[in-house]
Image (cartoon, rainbow, N blue to C red):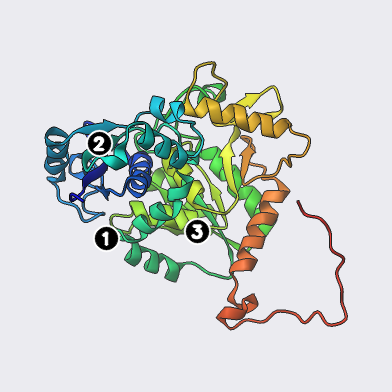
Amino acid sequence: MPALLRYCLPRVRHNGHGLANEIVPWARAFLAAQVLDAKLLPPAFGMNRRGYWRHFRTSPDDWIFNRAIEHVMPVIEFRETDYLAHGGEDVVPALRSFAAAHRLLERPLFAFVTEGMWGGYRHVQAAREFIRSTLYQSRYAPRNLLRLDERLDAQKIQIGMHVRLGDFVAPTSLHDYRAQPNASLPIAWFQNVAQNLRRAFGDDWQLLLVSDGDPEQLRELYSGFPCVLTADLPYRDCSDLLALAGSDMLVCSASCFSSLAAFLSEAPYLWFSQNLHSHAEGCYSMHGDSAELSAQSTSNRAALRDFLSPAAGHGGRGYAVDADGRVPQSALAAAALRRDLRRWERDLVRGGVVPISVGRREPLSRLG
């Protein structure tokens, strides 16, 4: 059998994008590499203006090799249209169908190339642990996370709050948040959420504040609430993502960074309701109705059908929160439960204890 020279790579365009934007095609290429028995190449971070090559131990001129691969080898592109044509949904079956249609497993030599955030996080669900482990193994994340762990009180409920300011612009009215991409949310909303969390949790909580804003913009937050900051940590993109994902509750900005943190998390998360699209069926989504065929519109329609199903429960991790910052009781309870589940004192394998249930028989009830 001839030696295989198969590569899978996510293509980086122009000056690259933020980390969350680069992660989706990277995860897609990772899954393709598993399906196609191919070598995975990281994105050409040398082209990225944020210098992510430092984080992921690649070379600043890595783009030369990636470009050369596309010039000297047969290129197989996997686009959104291919994904939809081969079933959509989970990208792994779509990749297997695509590979069979193009007889890729019979070919020893090619470069499989994909780009773009289309499909969102749902279609690369199978790569979630790859994303998490890649972030953990980045150059600066382990040391930063250890420093953060020393600042946090493990006994308290940890609220991760991402306040994206920087290059985002605030719309002129609440109604514009739905239409404007990369919108900077009102600081007042974050303050209102924090005030409601303080009413609910008293002194039994802390605020992990992650932001690209300057101290003056954030003064009302870090001076008024029990904050733990990450701003002094070097090269903190990966560690900020993982710290947010490890929180007991996330308060999100309208950004891909926040949505990636929520995707990697198992915790409840809060989203500014004015940034969401409302549906006549009585629910919100991050993407509005669309007649055109796309990965997002297909997912939206499937989720709406499930929402209207008589057997469907309407609970979930994501909560839409209005401008007044009032947090649903179920979200508060879920955050408190996550803190309780983290406690070593109630965890046998870490030396904790659990109650003896002698003489008590709890009735079984159907849960599904």
The x and y percentages for residue 56 are 25, 54
Q: State the separation of the CA atoms marked 3 and 2.
A: 29 Å
Q: State the separation of the CA atoms marked 3 and 1.
A: 19 Å
Q: State the separation of the CA atoms marked 1 and 2.
A: 21 Å
Residue drawn at (59%, 49%) of the image: 194
Residue 306 visible:
yes
The numbered mark at residue 139 is 1
Q: Quadrant of residue 193?
A: top right
Secondary element at image label 2: loop
Name the residue tied to disc 3: 246
Closer-to-camera residue (45/81): 81
Q: Given the image, on which type of amino acid does mark 3 rest?
A: Gly
Q: Given the image, on which type of amino acid does mark 1 rest?
A: Arg
Residue lying farthest to the front in this orientation: 1
The x and y percentages for residue 207 are 52, 56
The x and y percentages for residue 135 are 35, 56
Q: Is 183 situated left or right of 154 in this image?
A: left
Chain-order first, disc 3 or disc 2: 2
